Amino acid sequence: MTHRLFQLTALCGALLAFSSSARAWEPNAKDLEGAIGSGDFSSYQTNLTQWLNQKTPTAVTGEALKALLKDAVFAKALDQYQFIAKCGADKLGTFAKADKGNQEFLLWLTQDTGIMDLYLEAGEVPSGEACIPTLTFWNKVFHADPDSKSGIYLKLAIATALMHPVPFMDERKTPRVTEPYEGRYLYYKKLHQNRELQPTFDHLTVWEYQKVVEGMGAPTEDLTWVRQLIHTWRPDLKRTNNLVRIVGEVRYGTSPIPIVDMASVLDAGGICGRRSHFGRKTLAAFGIPSIGIFQPGHAALAYKRGDAWQVEYGAGWGKSTCEGGMDGPVFVAEAAARSHPLEFSQSEHLKWFASALTAKDTAKVIAEIADKIVPRATDATAIAKEPETKSEMEANGVSNTTAAVNAASASQEAVRVDAGTLRIAADKFDKMANVMVYESLPDGTGKQVNFQKNLDESWIDYTIDAPKAGTYALVLKLAAPNRDQVLNVTVGSNPAVALNVPNTRGLWGMTPALDLKLESGKQTLRIATPKQRGIAVKWLELKQLQTP
């Protein structure tokens, strides 16, 4: 009887042991927390790998794999596997053990599939030792700003962590790069909250946000200046969402003027590299993604306009190499794939799944299925949609005609004289040739008149009703981003007098006073420009100095 009891006890123990071993490991929060708390991710990674291998469908088909990806437990485990594999279990362990705040951050990150997807699908995620600075910065934003845990600011935080902007090099060879948290993440957050960015900023992916923050490459004060420049000097570029055309305002050629900031670039001019660099910084200032483009003997830029990426001031994608070495058509194909977010995500996840499998033949089949899920543009279709090349004049909307135009649309009002001072809004002219009238920004109140660059003849006529004959001091409120410009001022049939235009860095400023002799009563005051580089005028003022 005792022997029989012993046999039964042994059998029960064996069955219990078999039952325990038969219950395979499953992904669970307790083991994940243990790995993060101890900084030992090796065992957890091994268990994830074995578990994922067991999940391989019997029939490896596209539909079976897509169904597997819909399983929330599988999707989270796959993301955790890829995250650990990308960083390296040892490097991730070092990060976790460094600080309790790091552990809190990792628990938040690895328990949320959506957040892991944003990070892992963002593009070239750093691996190994290089992932530590990325996670360190993201962890800093996570603890410093609660808004960074969701929505646009979560994407912005990831993008800022992943992308390090190119320094702005002035001619003193002094690199200037903004600090990432205050100077990039919080800078864009504040701009977004103040509605200073283009509306498209709200709908970018992490991959695209990287091409905004990387496109900065200049101190925030430069980006602030360029937004003020556009608002003041060329509001039409913002209103028409054609900001890239600012590149055409940077004179092509070299100059002895030292380059110390973006304003000096616009003043001095430059060749293709400096001009495209200026364009990228302008786009970044308004939250528009862009990349640098290299072509044989030339540099250009590309940016996202609407739903597509296009090359500007260059030959097109077929002759382009993107920064980082990617061929232009390959970049277009990548952008096209990312425009199908569901399919792109499925493809990326299946590639990660394939990398986890020990059965190489099965992994190859899954990788091939992953490649076919996303509609991808071919080189031919990428190049076929290139816009026709236009001259720089046409691209900037400049017409070099000389016909005078009556200004009935300017709604001219009677000029009022008060205590010897006469002020006229720039758009209240009688006639003009080759000037543009724009609504002023940012508040949209009032108008301005813009003399465009490189025109042989450009002028505006105003009717002046002087209460008395005498000498009047003429001053103009204007904006000009270049030095050594003049306006020619004529009263009636008298010879033209040159009015020197100060470089106001493209912001509103005042000209020095110019003394003019006026007769009593109505007469015509003409303001004209010789060939120059663009001037915006808000108003002109005449103040009586003395009577004859």
Image (tube, grey):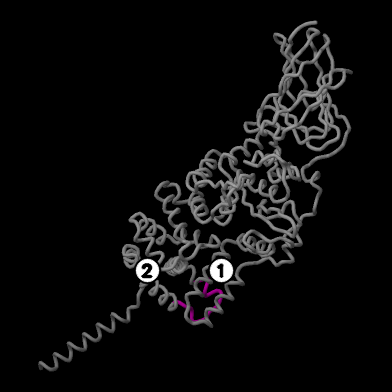
**Which residue is denoted by mark 2 in the rendering?**
41
- Report the quarter where the C terminus lies: top right
- Report the quarter where the N terminus lies: bottom left
Q: Is residue 59 magenta?
A: yes
407 lies above or below 76: above
Extreme-left residue of the structure: 2
Which residue is located at x 73 percent, y 31 percent? 536
Mark 2: secondary structure: loop
In the shown orientation, is residue 101 left or right of residue 263? left
479 lies above or below 296: above
Upstream in the sequence, badge 2 or badge 1? 2
Nearest the eye: 222 or 89 = 222
> What span is in magenta?
55-67
419 lies above or below 445: above
Nearest the eye: 406 or 543 = 543
Q: What amino acid does circle 2 point to?
A: Phe
Q: What amino acid does circle 1 point to?
A: Ser
In the shown orientation, is residue 430 left or right of residue 324? right
Depth check, mark 2 against mark 1: the one in front is: 2
Report x, y in % for residue 310.
70, 55
**Which residue is denoted by mark 1 in the rendering?**
347
43 lies above or below 92: below
**What is the distance, in whole Å, between disc 2 and disc 1 at their CAs?**
26 Å
Q: Residues within 10 Å of mark 2 (few under 14, many from 20)?
A: many
Q: Is residue 17 magenta?
A: no
Residue 321's image quarter? bottom right
Report x, y in % for residue 75.
46, 67
Q: Residues within 10 Å of mark 1 (few under 14, many from 20)?
A: many
Which residue is located at x 68 percent, y 27 percent? 446
Residue 29's image quarter? bottom left
Report x, y in % for residue 25.
35, 75
